[in-house]
Amino acid sequence: MDKIQNWDDAVAWWRSAPDDQKLTVVVVFALCGLIAALIANGKGRNPIVWFVVGVVLPIVGIVIAAAMSNLRHRAAAVAPTVVVQQPI
């Protein structure tokens, strides 16, 4: 297989590739998006946005989603505690 060095090479490969290879590429990209979305959702982030990031940047999106801080823990740590006293 020749190296894909630019967009024209990628398009030419896609047009000439067998259907099973195309399906494999689509499934791998979708799985990367799903993994990034699940990680991001567990950290309190928007899973739809991170699905798209995971599809566009397959491995990088997963790494970034895993490296992000957890918004749920941060929100719990800074949430004020309100104490209401009832009159006696």
Image: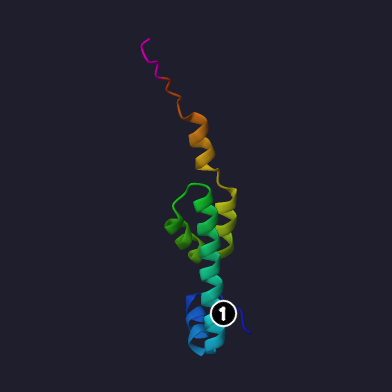
Residue 57 visible in the shown view: no
Question: Could you say where residue 40 lies in the image, as x and y percent from the top left?
Answer: 51, 52
Q: Residue at x 52, y 88 (%)?
A: 19
Residue at the right extreme of this rendering: 1
Task: Say what amino acid the circle numbered 1 marks.
Answer: Thr
Image height check: is 49 above or below 8? above
What residue sits right under mark 1 in the picture? 24
Lateral position of residue 85 relative to residue 36, left or right: left
Residue 9 visible in the shown view: yes
Dot 1, how many residues are within 10 Å of its Cα: few (below 14), some (14-19), or many (20+)?
few
Question: Could you say where residue 46 lies in the image, as x and y percent from the top left?
Answer: 44, 52
The C terminus appears in which quarter of the rendering?
A: top left
Q: Is residue 21 magenta?
A: no
Q: Residue at x 48, y 75 (%)?
A: 7
Question: Could you say where residue 44 lies in the image, as x and y percent from the top left?
Answer: 48, 47
The N terminus appears in which quarter of the rendering?
A: bottom right
Question: Could you say where residue 22 lies in the image, as x and y percent from the top left?
Answer: 52, 82
The total of numbered circles placed on residues is 1
Q: Residue at x 56, y 84 (%)?
A: 21
Q: Magenta part mainly helix, strand or loop?
A: loop
Region of the chain picked out in magenta, as a range: 84-88
Tag 1, which secondary structure?
helix
Image height check: is 75 above or below 82? below
Q: Is residue 85 magenta?
A: yes
Q: Quadrant of residue 82?
A: top left
Q: Quadrant of residue 25?
A: bottom right
Q: Nearer the viewer, residue 40 or 87?
A: 87
Residue at the top extreme of this rendering: 88
Q: Nearer the viewer, residue 14 or 62?
A: 62
